[in-house]
Image (cartoon, rainbow, N blue to C red):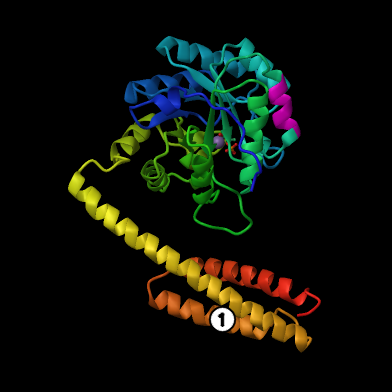
């Protein structure tokens, strides 16, 4: 939990945009002048309403030896190609000289990448370089699922006087393999939005998926979660891209993907539906109350067990009992249509709270 929620956001073109989704697209990297122009020309041809064009100029790569970006020369390719179509453009910045060079080249918006958000020194350097500059800044989530680190980046920029801020959710890296390149952990952007309702939120399905075939599913989910927009990588010849080839799509495929997204209303319009929804929601609230009461009851039994363990000098954690609990819960849970992953997380959280209660009791002198 952060103790103070203190950054000021002004409504911007992204949060105010009615024609959802606010669309940012373009290649992962600017590679050649021809590739930049061809990609952007085709993007505009197939997606004339695109809002902003992106291209990576300096690429933070996980391992050295990969293509690390074309550098400064690419800025004018991007700017020229966008000026031709009267569209704004954005690039990633990771340090002071990137900021200065991007501003000199007339880039319209800047984004901070996931590998920079994770580093407060890097974010502070960018914030200092931006003092007195009124330019929209988009901040990707840090690579690790740490909401405070993400919020901290907004606060640093805000302290430098920047109020035109937008979040980009690009998923979180993890050691275990999954269908995602970066796990979405949707609860994190949802929580960010709960704490900062005015903050515009863009989803980046390209870096979440790491592949083309699941882009639509993730983009649809983002729209259903009421995100304001999408940042999707596109390339004139994705298979030949110098970075992130597996996840890029052609401008035409982007058009098709967008046509397949179902846009739903985020408020109930029909009164009849509204009434039944109110009823369903009050049922949910009753059940939630009941869950909390049951959990409280469970914790008071845990405390009794804590005193028993203290008197008999036995450890809180009993591996055999814990594995019985997990097995039993997984069995009942799956029989009732709940996923194993959910049950496991639930019981782990309950157990953690139970250990906290037991520890408190056991550490009391008179336990
Ligand atoms: C990118 O947008 O190309 C990029 C490097 O993204 P991320 O910071 O999300 O890894
Ligand atoms: Mn990329």
Q: Is residue 103 left or right of residue 285?
A: right
| Residue 314 appears anywhere in the view | no
Badge 1: how crowded within 10 Å, few (<14), some, or many (20+)?
A: some
Q: Is residue 124 magenta?
A: yes
The quadrant in which residue 118 appears is: top right
Is label 1 within 8 A of ligand 1 (CB to nearest ligand atom)? Answer: no
Residue 168: percent from left, percent from top: 52, 36
User: What residue is shown with label 1?
Assistant: 325
| Placement of 260 over or under 252, stated as above or below | below
Secondary structure of residue under mark 1: helix
Front-lying residue, 36 or 204: 204
Q: Residue at x 21, y 50 (%)?
A: 273
Residue 311: x and y in percent read 76, 87
Q: Nearer the viewer, residue 81 or 154?
A: 154
Identify which residue, 157 or 232, lies in the foreground: 157
Q: Which quarter holds ligand 2?
A: top right
Q: Quadrant of residue 113?
A: top right
Residue sitting nearer the eye, 337 or 285: 285
Q: Position of residue 148 (x, y in %)?
A: 64, 43
Horizontally, residue 256 falls left or right of residue 328, namely left
Q: Which residues are magenta?
A: 121-128
Where's residue 177, x and y in %? 57, 58
| Residue drawn where x is 44% and y is 26% of the image | 14
Say above or below: 329 vs 215.
Answer: below
- Residue 76 lies left or right of residue 12; in this view the side is right
How many numbered callouts?
1
Looking at the image, the residue that sits furthest to the left is: 272
Task: Specify whether residue 299 is painted magenta.
Answer: no
* Main SS, magenta residues: helix
Q: Is residue 333 above or below residue 115?
A: below
- Name which residue lies at 59% across and 16% down: 75
Rendered view: 103 above or below 318: above
């Amino acid at each position: 939990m952060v103790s103070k929620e203190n950054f000021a956001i002004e409504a911007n073109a992204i949060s105010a945009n009615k024609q959802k989704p606010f669309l940012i697209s373009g290649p992962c990297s600017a590679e050649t002048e021809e590739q930049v122009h061809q990609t952007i020309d085709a993007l505009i041809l197939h997606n004339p309403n695109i809002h902003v064009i992106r291209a990576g100029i300096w690429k933070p790569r996980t391992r050295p030896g990969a293509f690390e970006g074309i550098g400064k020369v690419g800025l004018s390719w991007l700017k020229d190609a966008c000026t031709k179509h009267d569209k704004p453009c954005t690039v990633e910045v990771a340090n002071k000289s990137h900021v200065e060079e991007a501003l000199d080249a007339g880039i319209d918006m800047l984004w901070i990448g996931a590998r920079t958000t994770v580093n407060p020194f890097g974010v502070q350097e960018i914030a200092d370089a931006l003092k007195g500059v009124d330019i929209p800044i988009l901040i990707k989530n840090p690579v690790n699922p740490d909401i405070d680190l993400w919020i901290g980046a907004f606060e640093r920029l805000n302290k430098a006087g920047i109020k035109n801020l937008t979040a980009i959710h690009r998923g979180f890296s993890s050691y275990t393999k999954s269908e995602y390149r970066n796990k979405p952990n949707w609860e994190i952007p949802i929580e960010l939005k709960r704490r900062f309702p005015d903050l515009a939120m863009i989803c980046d399905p390209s870096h979440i998926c790491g592949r083309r075939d699941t882009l639509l599913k993730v983009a649809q989910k983002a729209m259903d979660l009421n995100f304001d927009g999408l940042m999707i990588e596109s390339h004139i010849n994705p298979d030949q891209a110098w970075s992130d080839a597996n996840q890029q799509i052609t401008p035409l495929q982007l058009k098709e993907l967008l046509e397949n997204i179902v846009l739903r209303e985020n408020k109930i319009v029909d009164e009849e539906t509204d009434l039944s929804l109110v009823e369903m929601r009050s049922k949910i609230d009753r059940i939630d109350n009941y869950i909390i009461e049951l959990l409280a009851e469970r914790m008071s039994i845990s405390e009794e067990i804590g005193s028993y363990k203290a008197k008999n000098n036995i450890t809180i954690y009993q591996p055999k009992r814990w594995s019985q609990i997990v097995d039993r819960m997984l069995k009942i849970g799956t029989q009732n249509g709940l996923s194993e992953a959910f049950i496991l997380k639930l019981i782990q959280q309950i157990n953690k709270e139970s250990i906290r209660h037991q520890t408190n009791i056991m550490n009391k002198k008179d336990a």
